[in-house]
Amino acid sequence: MTYGQEGTVTAFLFHEGTEHHAYRYLGCHRMDGGYVFRVWAPCAAKVYVVGDFNGWSEDDPMESLEGTGFWEAFIPSSRIREGGLYKYKLFCGQNVLYKADPFAASNGGWYESASRIFDPAGYPWRDGAWMEERKKKFSDGGARYSPVNIYELHMASWNRGEGGRVLSYTELGNELCPYLLQMGFTHVELTDALWDSEDGGISSFYSPSGRFGSARDFMELVEMLHRAGIGVAIEMDMFSFLDREEGLASFDGTSLYELGGEAEDTRFDLSKREVRSFLISNALYFADLLHIDVIRLKSIGRLVYNERGAFDRQRLTFIRSMNSVIREHYPDVITITDDDLAGSSAVTSTATDGLGFTFKWDSVCTRDTLDYASIPLRERDRTISVLSAPLKHAFGEASVLTLSLSDVAEGKKSFLSKMPGVYEQKFAGNRVFFTYMMTRPGKKFRFMGSEIGQFDEWDPERSVQWFLLDYESHARLQLYLARLNHIYLETPALWEQDCTPAGFVLDMAAGGVLAYRRRDKEGTEIVVVLNFTPYRMSSYTLGVGKCGEYEEILSSDSAQFGGSGIENGVKTSSPAKTGKTPYCVTVDLPPLGALILKNKDC
């Protein structure tokens, strides 16, 4: 057997809650001459490895590694192959349990309860250039000074094959890489990469979803995206797990991972040190062996409340510890919380008692955007404060501005359908709201399908309605959002100083109009003016910070984007007689229109 110094150290750290690479020892691993299987099941009397390689028989007993709760078995290569199915058969008192491997790197598929034999440590990665560039750009908080524009992708419903078939990881990669580059996204979140059920529940925490292919196929998808210059994000859940017969619940006949009790609670019991090792190792696993660039942790707001519903500071300590460990080993990996539980402390350093996330979702911005988008057009001139009030503090936090699939599902209407007005006004409204989100401080996160203007809500069982691109208004909206995204990528003033007051100045918020300036570290100025009303404002005086010429680099009302054709070209500033700015220009501001101007050197 292979139990020795490595096992002794791993067992000690695992039980102390400080083994952060438990996946390197536990689970299924390729060794000289075969595979070794290890599992933590301290209350089991006997354990066997069973699978298709031995006819699911008890031919391969596991040896108890005394005093550790670990069990181990070695099976030679002559009897086993990569991709084969296996489980652990545990004898626990009067019960016999068949369990999937908690550390399995691959699973059997959407409807298969077994694990698959696979060791990701041997994968021959070919994304070294991407990983090296990521290290240069994003280490030590560099992501906060870089463009981050994430496309939220539900793989099962982004695009479907003939007969409604979900695409494989390979098929998705072939279609995604050119599309994301065309549209100007920096990252893609594979939202359902870990899902083991339709509602997003997770049972196999270390394995990408087998619904779309093998774990090796998933790694090839990540590699394809990296080689195309696209980062990969995943959604992780450290709150609870699916209550499945083969899953973590009552793993060895006891509540090994869960809180348990009469309610059969499948929330993780974070008071157990081994559970903390399991979860922190889980995050490091995806950064280490699967080269994931962004980890978004969901349900953190629920996680910090204990089983009695009371706020639990020890759980905050766990989150802080997890982020500290990720930062120690992978300082260039981005972590995001989708909960606003702790204010700005969520994104401050763990060294100063913060939680240590790189970014947090700006739920206030999302709520205000959706609320204002639904206000009747003729009332917007009196309610612009809904958008302007949060802008006064927009630069104070490292935030991500989000419009997610959850905002356009289950009776909430699609974003286009939320817009008041006639058909043309809905599309114009879409353009101005997306310009607002892409130009105000904060990184970006936008759901799939938003770029083509679906009238229907997101349906996880149906593809994005790509046929809409046969209609001019939808095709021109997609063209506009691609241009807007590329302007964002090409313009440091829109992202370089997201988190500092020097990068943002709010000049006007009145009469349904917002006007503000963005600046980069070199002083280059971008001026944004947004008219959320249905009224054209000819000869509109717009404050600017510098003398000289200002070139209009984008008008949402341009005919090529589906507008009426109001554009401004180049404007020369003159001294301002009133207002907050030393200079001004006069522009023709279209109804439901957005203009972006860039100053030229004097």
Image: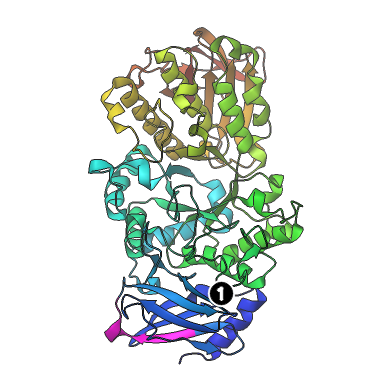
Closer to the camera in the image, 89 or 397: 89
Q: Is residue 27 shown in magenta? A: no
Above or below residue 563? Residue 523 is below
Seen from this angle, which residue lies furthest left? 162
Q: What residue do we see at 59% from left, 75% from top?
A: 19
Closer to the camera in the image, 482 or 580: 482
Q: Position of residue 568 (x, y in %)?
A: 43, 15
**Is label 1 in a helix, a strand or a loop?**
loop
In screen coordinates, is 137 left or right of 478?
right
Q: What residue do we see at 50% from left, 33% from top?
A: 410
User: Residue 347: in sight, yes or no?
Assistant: no
Residue 224, quarter of the rendered image: bottom left
Q: Residues within 10 Å of mark 1 (few under 14, many from 20)?
A: many
Q: How many marks do you count on the picture?
A: 1
Q: Residue at label 1? A: 252
Q: Which span of residues is magenta-colored?
A: 72-81
In screen coordinates, is 254 left or right of 588?
right
Above or below residue 87? Residue 563 is above
Q: Position of residue 15 (x, y in %)?
A: 64, 78
Closer to the camera in the image, 545 or 512: 512
Query: Which amino acid, mark 1?
Result: Asp
Residue 112, quarter of the rendered image: bottom left
User: Residue 100: in sight, yes or no?
Assistant: yes
Q: Is residue 75 shown in magenta? A: yes
Q: What residue do we see at 75% from left, 56% from top?
A: 312
Above or below residue 473? Residue 76 is below
